[in-house]
Image (tube, grey):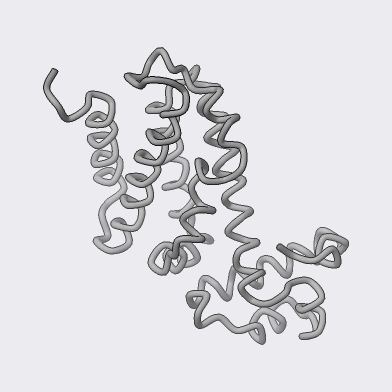
Amino acid sequence: MPKKTFFSLPEKKRNMVVEAAKKEFSRVPLANALVSNIIIDAKIPRGSFYQYFEDIEDCFYYIVDEYSKEIKTKLISNISLFEGDIIKSYHGLFLYILDMIEEKKNKNYFENLFLNMNHRVQKMFTPNFNEGLNNIINMVDVDKLNIQGRHQIGYVLDIIESLMIHNIVENYNRQIPKEKKIEIFERELILISKGIIKQ
């Protein structure tokens, strides 16, 4: 996470640094990103960058974490809106993420992020894995689920989030139209809802 110096910056300057970093991570994946491009674009000395972040990875994961917080907030809002229905909540979250990653200003950034995704990014990008899981579990309407108790909700969320991430990555690999992505995810949610074993 960034150092105190970064958070002490005026908001305008902080945003300039973040936008410069996003521009660099939109140009290339983290492995090929250069601090020199960020500092030129943000109009800061190299030394200042290292007063704000430990290294370029620290900067990269800070930006991912900011998106992660936004996604978790949206999921919690959805669970409240849909009265604990996790299928509707994740369907809404999937639509929200699709809109986010398809925005022109975000397109290249997220393409680099998802096509070069590692375990750490996946953990940060899926709301269930972040702190606050108990909060999410307590909001879920257990009466709508065929599970043995609240402790099993985490497993259900893992399955749904894995499908969600898989669909997003597949979008970049196969260039699937948005309507088709939604249709595929909806079918998968129906399978989860009904189960695959005949009763």
Q: Where residue 117 appears, x then y in whole percent?
A: 43, 64
Q: Quadrant of residue 176?
A: bottom left
**Would you say 50 lies left or right of 8 here?**
left
**Would you say 145 lies left or right of 129 here?**
left
**Would you say 120 lies left or right of 190 here?**
right
Quarter in which the N terminus is drawn: bottom right
Task: Tally the numbered discs.
Answer: 0
**Would you say 61 lies left or right of 75 here?**
right
Q: Where residue 189 appears, x then y in whole percent?
A: 29, 33
Instruction: Name the residue located 68 percent from the left edge and 66 percent from the top edge.
Output: 18
Q: Nearer the viewer, residue 11 or 56?
A: 56
Q: Nearer the viewer, residue 41 or 189?
A: 189
Instruction: Name the residue located 17 percent from the left edge and 30 percent from the top edge.
Output: 196
Quarter in which the C terminus is drawn: top left
Instruction: Name the residue located 27 percent from the left edge and 31 percent from the top edge.
Output: 192
Q: Quadrant of residue 85?
A: top left
Q: Against 185, is 45 above or below?
A: below
Q: Against 109, is 153 above or below?
A: above
Instruction: Name the residue located 36 percent from the left edge and 53 percent from the top edge.
Output: 168
Residue most extreme to the left: 198
Q: Quadrant of residue 41?
A: bottom right
Q: Where residue 14 appears, x then y in whole percent?
A: 78, 64
